[in-house]
Amino acid sequence: MTLRSRQAEQPAARERRAFEAAPAEQAQETGCSRQAEQPAARERRAFEAANTRIRIRFSKFGKIRFTSHRDVARIWERALRRAELPIAYTEGFSPRPKLSFGLALSTGYESHGEYLDVALRDALGDAEVHELPRRLAPALPEGIEVQAVVPLAAGAGSLQQAVTSCTWHIEMGAAPRSGVAHAMAGALAAPELVLTRQRKGRSVTDDVRPAILSAEVLGAGTIDAELATQPRGLRPAEFLAAVDPTWRADRVTRINQWTQVGGARREVIDLPPAATPPPHAEVRAS
Amino acid sequence: MTSVWTQLEPHLADVEKPARYIGMELGAQRREHRPGRVAWLLTYPDTYEIGLPNQGLQILYEILNERDDAVAERAYAPWGDLEAVMRRERIPLFSVDTHHAAGDFDVLAFNLSAELTYTNLLNCVDLAGVPVRAADRHPEHPLVAAGGHCAYNPEPLADFLDFVVLGDGEEVVSEITAVLADWKASGRTEGSRRGMLRALAGVEGVYVPSLYEVHYDGPAIRAIRPRYPDVPERIEKRTVADLTAWPYPRNQLVPLTEVVHDRLNVEVFRGCTRGCRFCQAGMITRPVRERPAEQVRTMVSEGLRRTGYDEVALTSLSTADFSGIESVVQGIVDDPSTCGQVSVSLPSLRVDAFTVGIAAQIQKARRTGLTFAPEAGTWRMRQIINKLIREEDLYGAVTSAFSQGWRRVKLYFLTGLPSETDEDTLGIYELARNCVEIGRSYTKGVSVKASVGGFVPKPFTPFQWFGQNTVDELYRKIGLLRDTTKRSKGLQLTWHDPRATLVEGLASRGDRRLGPVIEQVWRRGGTFQEWSEHFRLDLWLQAMADHGLDLDWYVYRHRTEAEVLPWDHISAGLHKDFLWQDWQDALAEVGLPDCRWTPCYDCGACTGYSIEHVVASAVAPAGGSQGTGQDLSTGHLVRTSVPVELRSRKLVGVGP
């Protein structure tokens, strides 16, 4: 879900700028650049300067996994204000911070890597960007942890477009299941896997096999799977249902979000090796 | 101490909005429970979204957690889906802070803000594993307590409550804690509960229902008397004399999931002396105690910085009356540290105090909806309810709003008021339609929403003697309005369910004999009665019939002066003869001025407790109040179209 992305806002903002005179002097006294409407060109330059957009990678673990995607968006809005980051706001009667979130994570799922793009009023220095994880930490609730922050190049595409697949770690609960590996092998070998699911209130039946890029059974009820997000995404619960309608996910963790760069698969923001948590070794807060 | 988290966790993925059960809010506290600490579970008997913002509970949560001899946590009513899981898996009611079982606490303290939550209170007590009837509880069980506005007539819940707290809780919670700490130290032995309750009855503001006996004379009450000589005959409410000493909440809870009133809330004053006769809050919270403007500013700026909120509500019963309100609002919206991103909302706006200045200020950052409450459609009716708003005051307010760019305005009205005629009811339509007309001269897309609620007479108001309108009569009046507004463009009518109004009226002025009724409705599944999809009038009617009780007697009947009212042993400071006189004045269509700026007429709220108003301004706010600073001689003028002079006022006072 994108929360009033910058892309969506710009045409309207341009129109409004044309409408409004520039009551800049009065507003500048308060030191607020949002109120200090600058001529359009200057503002665009400021936007395109380095470090006026940043991309944040964060994890979501423990009790807080029960918050929804919308909840997390609100949590971030407040956290950015509490950390006194110079966030850019949309214009108009109801200004909102210019935040853009990546693919929604289902309520109840955990993640090693979620993403958020933030537009800023003022550019940050490289050192400031580097310091951001430490600056944001005290403003965030337990269970949401900033892993990395990078400046976003001008013209960088949206997160929703960039991510083509995700790797998921799926646990099916305490009850030991036999034949998981066998069923999975059968499903993967089949020419097609037809699944009926609800999409936008309608029942859709199609072949989901192409969306399963890989699937590995690690133990009795544990599976790692890479599932496509485009053109039509496949959710972990749907993936299980496609293989065996009786299977239920007990605990699901997003391990990676993959982009395609020059034909190669790459995580949106790679963490330095030392900082990469060993798979499935995350200590659970709950 | 047992945490239910591990039992609960596997089921949370299967219930709606699981984030309401995880706690972890900014400001949440997890203090250690110790034998020397009285453990309070502050419970709101409705969902987390409704209960979390409750300022009363948040204030007590902080005050108790600042004490070394107390620890406080919070609980809310689980929604039906989780309740089913809890009952199936034998998971008790829990605190959201540490997920400790409710039964591990010493007190389950409920906030009573609405009558329709009473069955939820019983459900929460039952989910806690505690007998619902106080008489069935033993030393190992927590005490069940209640406070809040509805607690001024706790009689319908008398069978279920161990004690009730009347009035401001800031000071009295500590006194109660001291009594309970002694009881806890004594080992809570068999039989000790009675002695502890007797000691609690000696704390001013604490009512222990089981220590009083009600004597009946047929359906009427003959007397309500204490069972023991050391128990006071009358229980007086508590009043905090000076809000400055209580700048709470200091650490307002910031939820992780969406709740109502999801913003910083700063209480600017408590109490109201406008004297609207239907308004229980205005009667029981007297006198007016303002917080100094400087403290308000500090609480706002510190609160915004700490919470990250971009909206602040300045709360009170009538915020536009706050001395210097315009400069406070201006200070907030122009604060350079927030870069113009903070919006201010002023709930409970009085139309006679809503000026262009305020309108211009509060719309700077974000334009939220505007709500005014004229309450009644004609001047005659507004004199009866003592809401002395002239039509021109209302039109002036909506003119201010529309001229400042608002398009949507909401108007609150009551119907079923004393001596109301169809002309009065239809006056609601007249007023609303005129507001639409005014809006049209500013904008094409004007929308006026008139919200009509059935009037419920409340204890400790001059209308406590009035017989409530029947469900049929309320339906008839709403139908009248609906038919009239049907073809009126830009005007929408919404109304409160008259059947719910009936049950509110029943509980509002009920007595102890309603206990079994409430219990039966709860036992047959009547919880979440505030939620229209769960409201079950049939359960209430059946329970009344099963217990031989008469709706007409409880709800629709006018009371007489000599009658003993079920709450006569409780005191909100108001003299009963003052209320009766005010009731007679109402019937004579005589208004009463706001005593903040006029001589005292001795209602009893100040004199009885040796306290006074704390009001910074020596004069009534802009627009006046109830006849002070106002010329009400034109109030009776019935205007059927938009006054010409208002159209020409369009640009007055607007601008930089």
Image: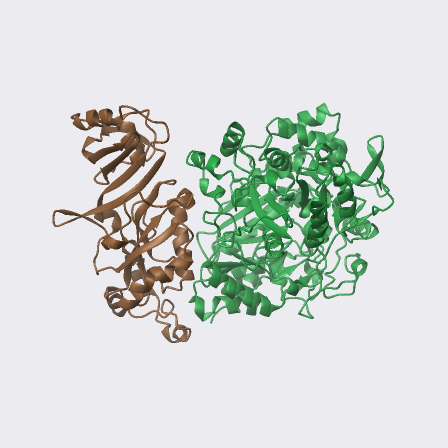
Query: Where is residue A235, by image quadrant?
Result: top left
**Looking at the image, which residue is at 29% across and 24% down?**
A178
Q: Position of residue A76 (x, y in %)?
A: 38, 54
Judging depth in this view, the residue of B365 and B313 nearest the camera is B313
State left or right for residue B77 relative to residue B245: left
Q: Position of residue B479 (x, y in %)?
A: 60, 36
Residue A97, above or below A239: below
User: Which color is chain A depicted in?
Assistant: brown
Judging depth in this view, the residue of B44 and B526 nearest the camera is B44
Do we see residue A18 in this rendering? no
Q: Position of residue B438 (x, y in %)?
A: 52, 56
How has the structure been colored for display?
by chain
Quadrant of the rendering where the C terminus of chain A is positioned? top left
Do we see residue B315 in this rendering? yes
Q: Which chain is green?
A: B
Query: Which residue ends up furthest to the left in the rendered image?
Result: A263
State left or right for residue A183 relative to residue B123: left
State left or right for residue A116 relative to residue B646: left
Count of numbered circles in the view: 0
Query: Where is residue A81, by image quadrant?
Result: bottom left
